[in-house]
Image: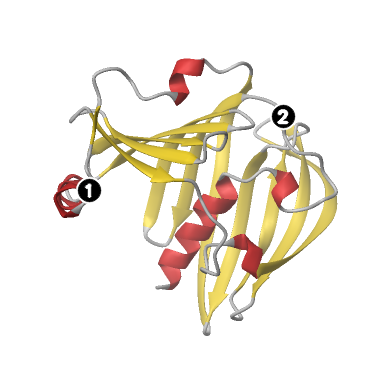
């Protein structure tokens, strides 16, 4: 249960700009691509990221199957694409809730620790402490580029006396315009019904 919480927090934090964590830094307005890895006690998840201020594309592998996730904040929608099956699933954008994975339910403290070089790039290092309304806590360090991109986080989560550590790091960060077609559903893809049959197919592909 704790590991699931850690992974959810890691994925959410990984998609945030520093402006989502503090009001002291302006929102990131650059476009970029990067290689991302999220590590926890259960293993590592590698992704290829393409990001703009309003869109994100995440390429990864689940259960041996290629998968892509496109998030369109400008349209309040997200798509999960299965290239091998040429199918996709559509879901509404994130809505505010009281779920543990909703950062609005956390009190966040951030302290600047100056500059530090990571992978040959000078970054701003900060200490961050997140305390949930239910007593869940997460604390650690994060590193951001001069553009405000969250490039690395090393943290420890605590829930009901249990502890779990996780890391997220983005490398090969390339600042630059991203092709618009990366954030659209490719031609020839069919929409997968979100009903029972669609969910059964999704579980089967995930479990390969």
Tell me residue 90's x, y (percent): 35, 40
Q: Residue 193 has which mark? A: none
Precedes in sequence: disc 1 or disc 2: 2
> Can you say whether 84 is above or below 78 in the image?
above
Which residue occupies the extreme bottom position in the image?
161
- Colour approach in the figure: secondary structure
Tag 1–tag 2 contact (CB < 8 Å): no
Left or right: 139, with 115 as reference point = left
Q: Residue at x 25, y 48 (%)?
A: 194
Q: Mark 2 points at which residue?
A: 29
Specify few, some or many for label 1: CA neighbours under 10 Å numbering under 14, 14-19, or 20 or more: some
Q: Is residue 114 left or right of residue 165?
A: right
Above-or-below relation of 97 to 70: below
Residue tagged by mark 1? 206
- Whether residue 188 is situated above or below residue 163 in the rendered picture: above
> Observer-nearest residue: 9 or 111?
9
Residue 127, given in percent of the width and then of the height, sits at 75, 58
Of 195 and 12, nearer the camera is: 195
Nearest the eye: 36 or 206? 206
Residue 199 location in percent, x, y? 21, 51
Give the structural element (helix, strand or loop) at label 2: loop
**Badge 1 element:** helix
The N terminus lies in quadrant: bottom left
Identify the residue shown where x is 82% and y is 51%.
Answer: 23
């Amino acid at each position: 249960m704790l590991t699931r919480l850690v992974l959810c927090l890691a994925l959410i934090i990984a998609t945030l700009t520093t402006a989502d964590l503090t009001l002291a830094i302006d929102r990131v307005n650059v476009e970029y691509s990067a290689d991302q890895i999220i590590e926890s006690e259960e293993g590592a998840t590698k992704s290829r990221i393409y990001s703009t201020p309003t869109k994100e594309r995440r390429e990864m592998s689940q259960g041996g199957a290629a998968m892509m996730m496109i998030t369109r904040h400008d349209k309040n929608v997200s798509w999960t694409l299965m290239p091998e099956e040429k199918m996709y699933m559509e879901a509404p954008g994130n809505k505010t809730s009281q779920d543990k994975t909703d950062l609005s339910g956390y009190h966040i403290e951030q302290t600047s620790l100056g500059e530090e070089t990571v992978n040959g790039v000078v970054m701003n290092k900060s200490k961050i402490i997140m305390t949930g309304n239910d007593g869940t806590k997460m604390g650690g360090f994060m590193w951001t580029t001069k553009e405000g991109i969250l490039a690395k986080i090393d943290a420890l989560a605590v829930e009901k006396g249990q502890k779990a550590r996780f890391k997220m790091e983005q490398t090969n960060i390339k600042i630059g315009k991203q092709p618009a077609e990366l954030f659209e559903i490719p031609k020839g893809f069919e929409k997968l019904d979100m009903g029972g049959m669609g969910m059964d197919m999704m579980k089967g592909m995930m479990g390969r």
